[in-house]
Image (spheres, helix red, strand yellow):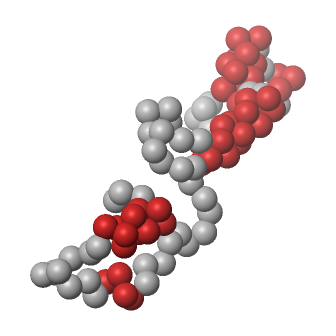
Amino acid sequence: MDTNPEKQVVPEEELEEYQGLVKFVSTYRDEKDITAEREDQDETAKKVPWYKFWVKAATTGEGFVVPDSWLTTNMKTGLTAHEVELRRKKVGYN
């Protein structure tokens, strides 16, 4: 038999007032807090910080797939201004 008082399970009726209070405080979970945490987690995935005004909200999915023609740009001639604008419209500056 285990004589360690910390490991023994004592019915709540037999707990003293202070022990019962400690158990209640350590195991209490407010439903409002739990649902608020879940909503905060959902909102953080959707929200963009105010200082990142140029970033669009995160979307779920794989993201943008770069066409192969974008990877074969000639280094000596580069891109035309029109091509640069088209690419920036699709993926932004980076």
1 is higher (above) or lower (below) than 62: above
The quadrant of the picture occupied by the C terminus is: bottom left
92 is higher (above) or lower (below) than 63: above
43 is higher (above) or lower (below) than 84: above
The image position of residue 8, as x and y in percent, is: 68, 37
Quadrant hosting residue 26: top right
Q: Is residue 62 shown left or right of residue 72?
A: right
| Any part of residue 34 in sight | no
| Residue at the outermost top position | 17
**Which residue: 45% across, 44% down?**
54
User: Between 25 and 16, which is closer to the camera in this rendering?
Assistant: 25
User: Between 18 and 84, which is closer to the camera in this rendering?
Assistant: 84
Q: Is residue 81 shown left or right of residue 66?
A: left
| Residue at the outermost left position | 76
Count of numbered labels shown in the rendering: 0
User: Between 87 and 15, which is closer to the camera in this rendering?
Assistant: 87
The image position of residue 76, as x and y in percent, is: 12, 81
**Which residue: 39% across, 88% down?**
68
**Which residue: 37% across, 87% down?**
69
The quadrant of the picture occupied by the N terminus is: top right
